[in-house]
Image (cartoon, helix red, strand yellow):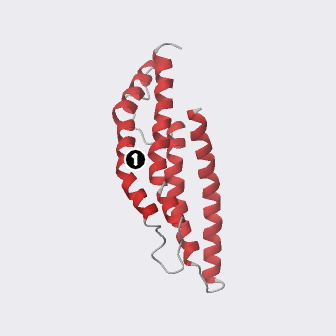
Amino acid sequence: MLERVSELLGKAAAWMTLFMVLVTFVVVVMRYVFDAGLIWLQESVVWMHAFVFMIGAAYTLQQEEHVRVDIFYREASPLRRAWIDLIGVAVFLLPICAFLAWKSYDFVAASWRLEEASREAGGLPYPLIPLLKSILLVMPITVGLQGIAMLQKCLRTIRGG
């Protein structure tokens, strides 16, 4: 179940990447062909870029495509890898996810409370800014859930199942 969430988020990030490229193309054509532009459209590209990285983090972890210093890991047995992953998730990943969620909560809540909109005239309207800032909470939660799925997998390997 937890793995499925990461897969769905990975697919969402992939589709968002395609959409971001198309919007960027539209922005460039509008600017250089028609000498026109929409501030909200340009801002949306920056936010889509953030969305792709933040939402894609859990999927990247699931696929083991994250950055890893594998001095010992590559040559390790599956049992040793499971122990390394278990300790890494329990000691580093989950506490960092909890810390990020805790520290970003007030920031996100303030954005919703203030009904924040873009500072630029013609920029993104409310509720898009708070919605997008909410990704700061979604990312550590989804990465944490993927970490729990990794813990379960590690425990199965350690138990020999």
Label 1's element? helix
Identify the image quadrant of residue 109. bottom left
Q: Position of residue 158 (x, y in %)?
A: 45, 16
Locate residue 98 relative to residue 28 in the image: left or right: left
Q: Quadrant of the C terminus?
A: top right
Identify the image quadrant of residue 73. top left
In this rendering, the count of numbered labels is 1
Disc 1 residue type (three-letter)? Ala
Locate residue 32 relative to residue 55 in the image: left or right: right
| Residue in the picture at 51% in, 30% down | 149
Identify the image quadrant of residue 59. top right
- The residue to which callout 1 is attached is 101
Near-viewer residue (18 or 2) = 2
Asked if residue 69 shows in the view, the reply is no
Asked if residue 153 is positioned above or below residue 43 in the image, the reply reads: above
Asked if residue 159 is positioned above or below residue 55 in the image, the reply reads: above
Asked if residue 28 is positioned above or below residue 147 in the image, the reply reads: below
Q: Position of residue 68 (x, y in %)?
A: 41, 38
Near-viewer residue (122 or 71) = 122
